[in-house]
Amino acid sequence: MTISLEETQHIATLARIALDDDELVTMQRELSAIIEIMADLRELDLDGVPATLHATITSCGLREDQPRASLPRREALAGAPRTRDFGFAVPKVMDK
Amino acid sequence: MTEYEAVIGLEVHGQLNTRTKMFCGCSTAFGAPPNTHVCPVCLGMPGALPVPNRRAIELAVRVGRALDCELFATSQFARKNYFYPDLAKGYQISQFELPLNGKGELTVELDGSPLAIGITRIHLEEDAAKNMHGVGGETLVDFNRAGVPLMEVVSEPDLRTAAQAEAYLKKLREVFLFCGANDGNLEEGSFRCDANVSIRPVGQARFGTRVELKNINSFRFVRLAIEFEIARQTALIAAGGEVVQETRTYSDARNETISMRGKEEAHDYRYFPDPDLPPLVLPEEMLARVTVPEQADAIRARFVASGLSSGAAMVLTSHPAFARYTDTVIAAGANAKTAANFIQAEVLRHARTDGLEATFPVPAERVAELLALVADGTINGKIAKDVFSQMVTSRRPPAAIIEEQGLAQVTDRGAIAQVVDQVLSDNPSQVAKYREGKTNLLGFFVGQVMKATQGQANPKVVNELLRERL
Amino acid sequence: MNRRNGLQTPSEGTARTRRYLDRIARHDGELNAFLHVDGEGALAPAAPGPLSGWVVAVKDNICTRGQKTTCGSNMLANFVSPYDAHVVTRLRANGATLIGKTNLDEFAMGSSGENSAFGATRNPHDLARVPGGSSSGSAAAVAAGLCDAALGSDTGGSVRQPAAFCGVTGIKPTHGRVSRYGLVAFASSLDQIGTLARDVRSAATLLTAISGHDPRDATSASRAVDDFAPQGVRGLRIGVLKGDLEREGNDERVVAGIQRAAKALEAEGATLVDVALPSAAHAVSAYYLIAPCEASSNLARFDGIRYGARASAADLRATYEETRARGFGPEVKRRIMLGTYALSSGYYDAYYLRAQKLRTLIRRDYESAFASCDVILGPTAPAPAFSLGERTDDPLSMYLADIYTLPASLAGLPAISTPCGFTEDGLPLAAQFVAPAFEERLAISAAAAIERSLGPFDVAPRYADGLPRSLSAGAA
């Protein structure tokens, strides 16, 4: 089983990673090779086998509804490449 | 000519009434300065991990039980993956294949007859951040709202008219409120509704192409938007056109639905179980403890049974705090009907609601004390209203106000008899007319006596003495 | 001989820290084990505690407040975390001195240490060879005696395999034993923080200090922490993975090492039984689906908006795509792409779900095996450390270096890699022990037994001069 160039481009778009033409071809080749060796998994009979999400922890920890200190705003914004008026600034987005 | 019917399904997002966010300890308070209720978890900082809020889960269980939903003792959080600046982690934590609550039902009353609407599921998720438009064409992101706990209630496509949809939403909001789970505030966005609307010829089983209506922030607009959309789609199909599957929003200024920007790409959310969150197994202790508080319908029935009019019962259950207040006054010994009348006429004028909370000018216990003083004849109803006004401003107990200002009724027959005699001797001609048969002058004499006693004479005694002497 | 953990006086501690700082200054130029050394912080007085005087290095994908945490990535080249990871808090509270942050394969994705954006780390036993990965810097720093011990993270073998290549002990505890809060996630259902040290007891002592329930991690086990100190192995049933030893492609020196280890255990009173994990043959496929799937989502947060480097571009979409194209290295991109593909519409059932089902089969295999034994012995890696550059152009051959560490990762089980000898040219060989969930001590005890018998395995010979003596009670 192989992955087409179009599919590779679609995946790159979903993953938001820009790939130039050469990178796209290399990526397509490498992904196809990796998928190829996973053929063993497709051939196994796994009907009726439950999935394991967590091997050792079977139930989710919970927390009480108790407030904890938030970060000082200065620290929250400190690492941002661009801020304005105490907001994280990004190129304009349209409403969803 | 082909007859068409609409098929409507609603998705309601209700903010769960918690102090902290779904997966971190940041406050959920509305209206704080930008990016002050944020931490490594809700900012999606490297290494930060989510831990679910027990209270949020309990509230969603409660709503699920109120809607007779199948409750899943084990459910699973899942990641919905997409990139957007309001999404800190590049995914939203939601529930997908295994929600907290499965199928349930909500019955609404429409034109006097009940209509059962199926609930598909209720699942938990986290809210996104808020994008604000900055100057210079930039978007500024405020993460205060990011991670606020939401329950999404998805209805079956059982609704056929805009009026049914509106009735369903109002009823659902009432359930949220009486579960103490959500404050039902559409303006602040803590109660949000999306509607899926499609049209099909009557008798056709297959659904038509659906349009999703988003971001509608009032019940009226939901109704108008659906009405418009039904008309638009019907006209389109009747004219031989086709409905395009898309997302539209409602413009109240134009009273029409408007297509939102076309999708750049087909969405592929790549849902998968969140590996940071093992299966959510509801603790036995929680299942045993979480019960559904008395719902509005039951309270109304109880009020009517205790003698209230259905109108009064409706007013006093329009907010859970009103019902609690009424119950407290009655529990303290007041006559149900008297209490209901007094609360409606006097108390609610001064009451303020703020989400699930309400503030009353005077505690229910004090109103009960006041009504007890009327019942035992210490004051009359008219004085009671004055005393209540003073209780509102001075915050003092009614007995103290009455005592201090000498407002207690005069019930001493001797003292009242003196005033009665004085009134009769001051008004000989009216006395003569009364005795000639104009008995409706009794009210005049009562008024004179009350005036002379500044309203404090016991009206019953006044009446008795006047009748004796006339 | 100091029979207790820790030091007598604070000034002794400072002197010790200075010696390690000197060693780093002298040797790390050629090793590139450290990304940041915190001389000032390390010389500040530490709290008194069981790790008093211990000089510990921390893998640079574990958050340290006020210090850089780069994950070996250009994406986070200047990222300073506003908080300490749970394990860092625990180290500080136990009196440890944190000397710096160690190099790693970018976002812990790699098996050679060569995927760091800040240059490869070299193997202290042979500078032309890789130290293994992804905890490359931690293993190299411990092996070269640049610190007493180090923290690493292990997703598919990232503590054990570099420990094996560098001739030190590395423990990956049970999934859930150590809080992941503050560990930058690669594959959440597999990631565990582990410890590396020059002797088994030290690695166990450090593990005791960082283990235990943390309410900030919903996958943290709420179990009491045992004392992980090794015990005798008399009567212990050791399951030997005969199939793994007979597998084609194994370096015969590795096989000989395991046989030597098995004999040593027998001599100490343990019994040997043959066990097999039939489904483990598919572990590579399952792992290289599950880990990339989780990673594709875990690494979506690196978008250049709230922190990290951002590429400027015309619009939002291009900003995302350029930021991530420049911020991530080739292996990280490859895994994000693979995971995105495997989770995308139409493939979920064929890949992700099947991989998770295979995980169940591997778990069942272990359950059957543990019916007849207490600990399972096998190789950590099929061969000793390979040469720098040897596999960089062939991702698949790199993935196969993890073949023996993956099954325990998929099953969430505790595992330890410990030296069991050297090749003629001085390359370390290692044995791996896997124990049932939360039975770390069984694996630790078995490892300590072969250390007693075949060791001691100390610092790489080239760096033997002037090494401060171990503070671990009972260590050689």
Image (tube, grey):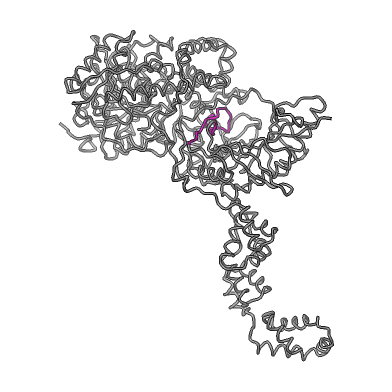
**Can you give x and y, in whole percent of width and height, for residue B213 in the image?**
69, 34
Q: Is residue B352 left or right of residue B126?
A: right
Which residue shows up at 69% across the image and 39% down it? B216
Magenta-highlighted residues = B74-96
Which residue shows up at 40% across the image and 22% down it? C361
Classify C350 as above or below B88.
above
Q: Residue furthest front?
A: B203
Classify B354 as above or below C71.
below
Q: Quadrant of residue B369?
A: bottom right
Note whether residue A70 is visible. Answer: no
- Point out the image quarter for the N terminus of chain C: top left
Q: Quadrant of residue B155?
A: top right
**Can you give x and y, in whole percent of width and height, for residue B171 in the image?**
65, 46
In depth, the one of B71 and C342 nearer the eye is B71
In depth, the one of B100 and B402 nearer the eye is B100
Note whether residue B464 is visible. Answer: yes
Q: Is residue B93 magenta-colored?
A: yes
Q: Is residue C428 left or right of residue B317?
A: left
